[in-house]
Amino acid sequence: MRGKLREKIHTVVFESDTAAGKAFDVALITLILLSVLTVLLESVASLRERYGAALHVLEWTFTIVFTIEYLLRLYCVQRPLAYARSFFGVVDLMACLPMYLNFFIPGAHSLIVVRSLRLLRIFRVFKLSHYFQEGQVIVQALRASRYKILVFLFSILIVVIISGSLMYLVEGPASGFKDIPVSLYWSVVTMTTVGYGDIAPRTPLGQFLASLLMIVGYSIIAVPTGIVTSEFTRLRGITRNACPVCGAEGHDPDALHCKFCGGRL
Amino acid sequence: MRGKLREKIHTVVFESDTAAGKAFDVALITLILLSVLTVLLESVASLRERYGAALHVLEWTFTIVFTIEYLLRLYCVQRPLAYARSFFGVVDLMACLPMYLNFFIPGAHSLIVVRSLRLLRIFRVFKLSHYFQEGQVIVQALRASRYKILVFLFSILIVVIISGSLMYLVEGPASGFKDIPVSLYWSVVTMTTVGYGDIAPRTPLGQFLASLLMIVGYSIIAVPTGIVTSEFTRLRGITRNACPVCGAEGHDPDALHCKFCGGRL
Amino acid sequence: MRGKLREKIHTVVFESDTAAGKAFDVALITLILLSVLTVLLESVASLRERYGAALHVLEWTFTIVFTIEYLLRLYCVQRPLAYARSFFGVVDLMACLPMYLNFFIPGAHSLIVVRSLRLLRIFRVFKLSHYFQEGQVIVQALRASRYKILVFLFSILIVVIISGSLMYLVEGPASGFKDIPVSLYWSVVTMTTVGYGDIAPRTPLGQFLASLLMIVGYSIIAVPTGIVTSEFTRLRGITRNACPVCGAEGHDPDALHCKFCGGRL
Amino acid sequence: MRGKLREKIHTVVFESDTAAGKAFDVALITLILLSVLTVLLESVASLRERYGAALHVLEWTFTIVFTIEYLLRLYCVQRPLAYARSFFGVVDLMACLPMYLNFFIPGAHSLIVVRSLRLLRIFRVFKLSHYFQEGQVIVQALRASRYKILVFLFSILIVVIISGSLMYLVEGPASGFKDIPVSLYWSVVTMTTVGYGDIAPRTPLGQFLASLLMIVGYSIIAVPTGIVTSEFTRLRGITRNACPVCGAEGHDPDALHCKFCGGRL
């Protein structure tokens, strides 16, 4: 009988096919959204002064609910350790922990916003298979181009180190380049075209070098874009029409024979 | 006879095939441009002081003309409710309303700039079918990639929430991160590479985390670009014609013979 | 005999096949670069104080040389009017004019930097046909997508007008949004992700609306990129291999028959 | 026997197939990373005050080790001059030089960060052939589009010169446009959408012109992206294998049969 209760909880908590399961999931997502909103509002000084106590109570309520939910999940799954180690298991734990950590490290409770990661469940709940599938395509495109992207990031790193140090030498502390780490930060801010302006070159030579760096940063954005785009185009090609003989997919629109079994399409 | 007048008005107001209809449309677009310009100029303090009265009269004149035009449209269409609910119907109404609302909410009249949406008629008036068709392709490409784009925006949202809260913890009010909502705003400003600089990290750790966020923001712009580009490429491919002999698709728009069987297209 | 002199001048001034013509062109480009550099240096206060007189003499020397060159060109071409109206004819004239205009409008001589447009001759001089051809491809790709790009710019214009006016209402003069034209300027600065930070929203609502605008601006950069990229991909496809029967180009790499004459490739 | 020692050193220093060679390379990369880190930390004022002496000793130690390594490399290669002139030869020399230069030019030792270029060896050491191959594809794509990119950069240069000078005339020193070189710097900052905000237009006309420049800058980023993307797409197409039966190219990497004749690939 206890096993049956466990199974029942499992259906409600982990699945969303039944009415109870779906209601549970919708309630959960609403709670997550509300709890993130609470943390946001609690951080605003004027609101904290007025409604501080109420918001604090709310935060604890959400945390206790999420803790109970986490324990329920641990209780009803067949292999608790596997769940605890899975991506969502870790996220679920981290959704409760910061509030308790707050006793030891003041301010840590702001980390509860990690709860927002739990929103990823949204795709499962509403059976948004469309979204999920498309998300898969994006992930696949990024994975297929991971080597190229890493090479790209590594090259950027080297450009950042060299240009940052050069600017430190050229501009010096007077323009805000007070040490090399700050100059590297400036380099990233400039290459990515963010450009805060808190640190900016003032000498003619510094401005000239910065201009070169900007044009480099502006131009090489073409590289990751080119990589990912050609990957998307390829992935689209692969998911095209199926062979009537062997059922294999991925034929070009102009193919006359199946490229796997040779059968006429 | 009244029905005839109505039909006549309809031809002038809604169609642009006749000389009168075209003249009406050109006059309307000129009026829209002038009225938007009036609102712009009226907001400039120095001009308002000198020409305030004249500009105010102009604004009211335009509003009355547009109100009459709106009533005429309502009068001469066969199904007024359908028009009133259509996109252009709502826009036409909103082009008049703010001026009257001004009696109740001071400053509301600036909303008349919604009138600029009426300029979309420009494409219909000048029979800019080319433009219209190309606009369709853009809309189609965006619609086809709507799931991917939503997944992308959702992921950005989660990154913004987590990175913003983290920066609030790391930097604190001293650097301008006075609460989490402001930190989220900073996150968006940074990830989209806008970078105002009104809020900027000052601690080494904050600058390091911000650098990571920038590189993420800079790199993932490749994702929407890749999605939309591959969609454009596909749409172009689809509009190629099929061979009447062998049925193969994928011919260039300038092909005279099928590239597979050599049959005349 | 006079006609012969004219022809000789024409060969030297307009063509770059002969040694004299090439020398003339190289000298001309050097002069253009030096004259642009002179204007740049002359604008720097510290240099103007010290070398003002010398730089002024240099500017006049360049201008007189370019004026003589312009008159020579007018003299030796068969149809002076056609030359004077051509792109390079207008640029050549504008390279001299600002200096003389300076007598009437002080400061106008800075416009001589229009001379830099004359540098476009560089592609002709060094027979950089490679560059020229590639430039053609870029121009062709942009021309083919001109309708889409105009629709895109028109949509941006409407978004800028509406979002700018909305921000003027929400933020008001306190945050720097002193009138609608300035707010439109802010809108462009934000949508294009430039983000100077001289004007920035301060109210929570304004920051929220600005965040939306940023994400829109960040996302829709995918549209022109998608348009131009798919155009480049198509243009590349068109310039592929030629048919051995009719010589037509533009076949796909996998075509078996010429799509124009049906002959086997 | 001396030749044998030389050969042995060569194996250890230049190759990474043997255990000793691999250990040497890993140690080298660790040293490079540590030495770059030392320079970074040494530049921070607070750390320099406390640990200045220790960091200085570390810097010298690394430099001496790298100098010995450089001399060893020179000693054991068969053609020292060829090595000294090669890319890595120059980098290896520049990794030692700045420290010695410091005796003559104070501050020059910061240039040691050029050492970070030595990290490029990382790809060779860990036999990251995947990365290397992908890096090749990126380089190949950039090389194939070099003419287009140069034409693009040249056009940007002319736009920068003309728009910068125009803004100098329109805005003048009051808004920070103190001379034309600074205005050119502003132009680059704006066109690349970096937007520091240290210099920003204040007059309505200046803000209007700046808006146009921003939209141009925002739109033409599509050009390099389009160029590089279509190149990536083409390179992918080229690396598809040809059919041994009919010779047709353009098969997917996972195809087993020719899609045109059905023959086994």
Image (spheres, coloured by chain):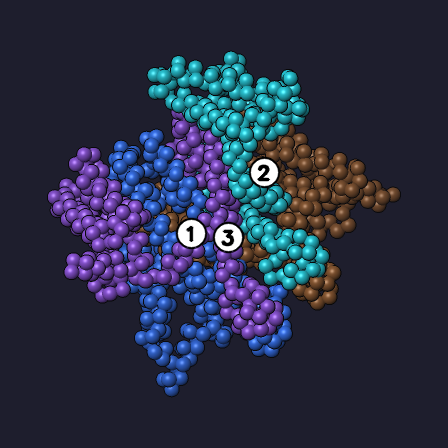
Chain colours: A blue, B brown, C cyan, D purple
Quarter of the image containing the N terminus of chain D?
Answer: bottom left
Q: Residue at x 63, y 34 (%)?
A: B33
In the rendering, at what x and y percent does residue C241 appear?
A: 60, 55
Subunit bearing disc 1: D
Q: Residue D231 carries which label?
A: 3
Q: Residue at x 26, y 60 (%)?
A: D15
User: Which residue ends up furthest to the right in the rendered image?
Assistant: B1
The residue mark sitting in front, 2 or 1, is 1
Question: For the residues marked 1 and 3, what is the alpha-carbon distance in whole angstroms?
Answer: 11 Å
Circles 1 and 3: CB distance less than 8 Å?
no
Q: Which mark is residue B113?
A: 2
User: Which residue ends up furthest to the bottom in the rendered image?
Assistant: A1
Amino acid of disc 2: Val
The crowd level at tag 3 (other Cα within 10 Å; few <14, some 14-19, many 20+) is many
Figure quadrant of residue D22 = bottom left
The residue mark sitting in front, 2 or 3, is 3
Report if residue A46 is visible in the image: no
Q: Which residue is drawn at 40% across and 84% down?
A: A4
Q: Which mark is residue D139?
A: 1
C239 sits to left or right of A71: right
Figure quadrant of residue A80 = bottom left
Q: Which residue is drawn at 47% across and 35% down?
A: D157
Question: For the residues marked 2 and 3, what is the alpha-carbon distance in whole angstroms?
Answer: 44 Å
Subunit bearing disc 3: D
